[in-house]
Amino acid sequence: MQLEAADYAAILDVLESVAGSHDTRDYAARVSAGLFRLFPSQGASCTEIDVTGRRVVSEPAPPFPSGWIAQYGPAFENFAWQHPLFGKLISGERVGPTSWSVDGAESAFARTELYRSFYEPNGVRRQIVLIFPTPHGTSIVISIDCAAAHPCGGREAAMLSTIAPLLETSYRLVSRAEGNLVWPFADARGAVKADVSAPAGPAPRTPLGESSDKLTIDDAQLRAHQALRSAGLTARQAEIALMVASGAATSQIATTLQISTGTVRKHLEAVHATLGVSSRAAVAATVMRLVHPEAADILGQPLLSR
């Protein structure tokens, strides 16, 4: 979509605000507020994900209302693995901007517990998502929440594509200026997995808020993905297996991953051969046993192991 001069002027306003960030936490707040002003949407957020520490902390715009984390946090913790982009969220890859929509290719997502208990109650039917890795081993996830009243479209996607590399560069500059502190996960336990040793600098700051203000990722979600990899699946095959378990059809997987249906089928053949199963239902059951070990007896087969 061709952007207009007014669109570029609006983008520059956001970048000017982000350029004034005094640390990465302030950066996150400015990005969210800027994108919420830029797009007619349900909301915007800048989130840092620490897979190793299983923590997800957001700076949303507008802010979470009182009690929101307590009400919706458990649903995210238990069912985040059902997210259409879960494999990418925990892979540390650079992604997008991309999107999912329950009114489009990801309609099966609407039947998942994550959607019904987390996104639907908050009126979110579509997201436009940008993911980039940080120098200290976490991932930044920038998302625009779209609702029926604010459906988002080509303009929003084009504007986020334009601003994406500049937002990533801004993050890296701010991060370096503050000594590569790990926002907002730096703590005395050193739970963040870093790709490189962080340079010497000031003492880590306190994580955002108290524990009640954090979302977490359940160990089971990571265990499922990691166990599938340990069983011999590639990262893409594990991602597809998780999507199959969430109820996604071959065409939906192909659209989400931007690959052909033939490629999806080849990956599924490899998944079947590696896991020793012969159907999508068996793949889903295997994933469920990994996510919920207590269900192994009910499902009638032993847990996958290597």
Image (cartoon, grey):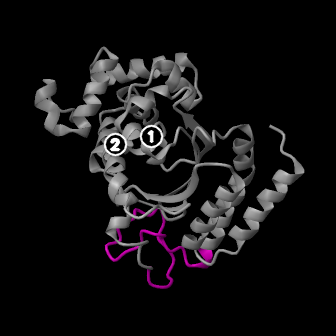
Q: Residue at x 54, y 73 (%)?
A: 180
Q: Which tag is nearer the camera, tag 1 or tag 2? A: 1
Q: Is disc 1 placed on a helix, strand or loop?
A: helix
Q: Position of residue 138 (x, y in %)?
A: 47, 59
Q: Looking at the figure, which quarter contains the N terminus? A: top right
167 relative to 187, above or below: above
Residue 13 falls inside the magenta stretch:
no
Image quarter in which the C terminus is found: top left
Q: Is residue 114 left or right of residue 26?
A: left
Q: Earlier in the sequence, mark 1 or mark 2?
A: 2
Residue denoted by label 2:
79
Mark 2 packing: few (<14 Cα in 10 Å), some, or many (20+)?
many
Q: CA distance from mark 1 to mark 2?
A: 14 Å
The label shown at residue 120 is 1
Residue at 38% across, 30% down: 246
Q: Let me know if residue 177 is in the magenta part.
A: yes
In the image, which residues are magenta?
A: 176-204
Rendering coords of residue 179 (x, y %): 55, 78
User: Hey, which quadrant is residue 229 in on the image?
Assistant: top left
Secondary structure mostly seen in the magenta stretch: loop
> Amino acid under label 1?
Glu
Give me the disc on residue 303.
none
